[in-house]
Each structure stands twice: as C-alpha cells, then as structure tokens.
Image (cartoon, rainbow, N blue to C red):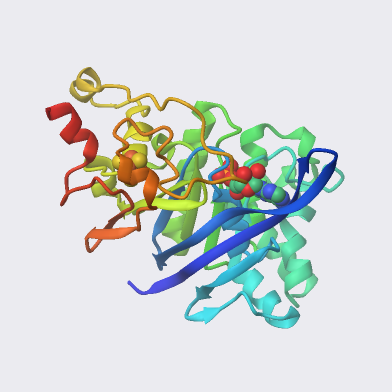
Amino acid sequence: MTDLLDVHNLTVRFGVRRKGGMFARQTYLTAVDDISFTVRKGETLAIVGESGSGKTTAALAIARLVSGVTSGKVELEGRDILPLDRDDLKDMRQKVQVIFQDPYSSLNPRKRAEDIVREPLDSLTDKSDPEKREIVDQLFKAVGLRPEQKRLFPHQFSGGQRQRIGIARALSTQPEVIICDEPVSALDVAVQAQILNLLRRLQAEYGLTYLFISHDLGVVQHMCDSVAVMYMGKIVEHADRMSLFNKPLHPYTEALLSAVPSVDPRLRENARRILIPGDPPDPLNLPKGCRFASRCPVAAPECRESAPSLDAVTPSHRVACHLVEGETSPLATLSAS
Ligand SMILES: Nc1ncnc2c1ncn2[C@@H]1O[C@H](COP(=O)(O)OP(=O)(O)O)[C@@H](O)[C@H]1O
Ligand code: SF4
Ligand SMILES: [Mg+2]
C-alpha cells in the first residue's frame, strides 16, 4: 500500500491573551508541536489522547480549516496542501472531508437533510442538478437512511441518524481521506457500535482512508491499523495496533489502556488500573523536560531536565520516553522491582 497522507513536523500556534496584573498580554499557545506521521491508502490511523491534547487542532490543520500553522508540511498524494490557493484548495477539499464530533451542532438546523448532504457538491463541484440528486439518493441508501427522510430537518432525527447525515455529507465528494473527529463520543454506547460498523463497512466499500480521532482507546481498538497517542501537543507514542495494545511503552499510553475494559475475562482479572494523578501542565507554560513528568509514576530527575525525542524502537513503533529500554516499558520495570 502507498502513503496517501504524509504529515511532516506540523506545528500550530494560537495567539491568546493572557491576564497579567492589570493588563492582558498577547502570548502564544502551541496546540500541536512538531508532529509527523504517515497514513497509507485504505488504512486507519487513530489519534488518541485526553481532551486538550491537540487532536482537533491537528485534524483541522490537516483539513486546512484552521489558521495558525507555523511550520510543517501536509502532503496528500505527495503534494503539500498547506500553500494551496483558492482553486487548488477546492480540489483538495473534495479529497479530504471531516466528520465532526457533535451531530447536533455540526448540522445546519434550518436545512433539510438532503440539502445538508448535497452542500459539498454545490460548493466544490460542477455537477448538474440531476447528477447531484442521484448522488444524494445513493448516499442516503449507503448510510442506512430512508428516501422519505431526505425532506426532514436535523431535529427530526435521533443522534445516530444525524451522524449518518454527517457521514453522507462527508462522502458526497468521493473523498480519499475522511477525518473522523470523535464521531461517536456524543452517542449512546449501543448507537456507537452501529456507527462504527457503518464506518468500517464504508471504508471497505469505498477504499477510504481514515484519520480517526478519539479520547478513548476502547473505541479505536477495533477500528485502526495504527495509533498515535498525543499528550499536550506532542505525539508520545506511535505504533501499529498490535504493538500498541499488546506492548505499550509510554507510561501515559499504559494509563490510558488500563482504563479500557477488556472483553477477555482473564485479562480483566489481571488488569490493574493505572491512575494518572495530578493535572496536565499549563499549555501556556510548558515545562522544559518531559511534558508528562508532573503526572508520571516513574519520573526521574533527567525527565525534568530534557524533553525526550520520539525514537523508533522497532520499524513500526516510536516512543518518546527517557526510561524506555529496548522494548521494555518503565512501568514494567517498576512492577518487577
Ligand atoms: N482557537 C483556539 N484558540 C486558542 N486556543 C485554542 C484554540 N483551539 C484550541 N485551543 C487550545 O489548544 C489546545 C488543544 O485543543 P484541541 O485541539 O481542541 O484538543 P483536543 O481536540 O485534543 O481536545 C487546548 O489547550 C485548547 O484550549
Ligand atoms: S520521560 Fe520520564 S517523565 Fe516522561 S514519560 Fe518517560 S519516564 Fe515518565
Ligand atoms: Mg477535540
């Protein structure tokens, strides 16, 4: 399989005003800090991390939907999309679509479902009216909505059905890449499974490539080929699915994983919940060393001195932690001693 999306050293900063005494002063918040990854055609990369880790900002930057990119490249089929001007951007927007977290706020309440699904075709393509109608009809069928539902407004649908409308809209321009930003987080568990199954089926049917964002490793475990774990704007671990779930190396990944209920009862019995104490650092005042040091159960003096780099331990597994030795996690060393 070939690389479809190549993100190189992407950094996104927002100008914010910070209160200081009587005066607010302008400063910068680095929401995404020098991240790099590759997604192959037809595959799913999950980006996982707690709220505030920079997932949405990274997604919006990759879709050219946020300003504030200060450096880096986002290559789609080998072409950097960050410098594109208006006409080329139109072409790129057909190829990269987004499904948003909240199916309540991301759909225009005054538009009928068929017009919502049709909107990207109107704004990005030159297709004729009959062609657009045909595509909308097919998409309603593909996402499991009934033809008579085309004329309804968003408030007449359930949460799961609304997300189906959002998925149909994202599919309308036959994109290569779909960025799914927490697409099931606002839904009930039973409905989550239906939407995840639908996304998987559509991926197989249309050969889609997904960037799948979630704060919950449990949601992505049956949904991804590889996982990048983010913490405070940085990728701290990135591995193929098997390695990440079976051999996590970063203490933060281990803590996130320990919160995922296991379906295997033997694993459930042996599981120990790793609690992450304390709060993340202030994003406007990040420490010079490892950003996880204030919460890491094995932090050593060197961790506060210098930031660990994201290094490969195998060809498909990278981790940023000073205390990883070979393929052994520092928490494994701790529990053995
Ligand atoms: N438009 C913005 N202006 C200023 N700060 C922002 C903006 N959007 C996000 N942030 C900040 O960037 C950081 C990352 O946010 P976000 O990308 O939404 O994280 P996540 O999706 O992982 O929850 C947070 O500290 C957030 O407050
Ligand atoms: S570098 Fe140190 S503080 Fe950071 S995760 Fe590794 S052990 Fe913990
Ligand atoms: Mg988010």
Point 72% across, 81% down: residue: 85
Image side of residue 249 versus residue 286, left or right:
left
Point 57% across, 67% down: residue: 175
The answer, for residue 80, to whether it is visible in the render is yes
* Nearer to me, 105 or 75: 75
The answer, for residue 139, to whether it is visible in the render is no
The N terminus lies in which quarter of the figure? bottom left
Residue 282: percent from left, percent from top? 58, 39
Residue 90: percent from left, percent from top? 70, 75
* Nearer to me, 106 or 67: 67
Image side of residue 318 versus residue 42, left or right:
left
Above or below residue 336? Residue 34 is below
Above or below residue 72? Residue 239 is above
Point 41% across, 32% down: residue: 295
Residue 57: percent from left, percent from top? 61, 53
* Nearer to me, 135 or 115: 115
Above or below residue 192? Residue 174 is below
From this viewpoint, which residue is outermost toward the left?
337
From this viewpoint, which residue is outermost toward the front?
21
Image side of residue 231 versus residue 68, left or right:
left
Above or below residue 311? Residue 82 is below
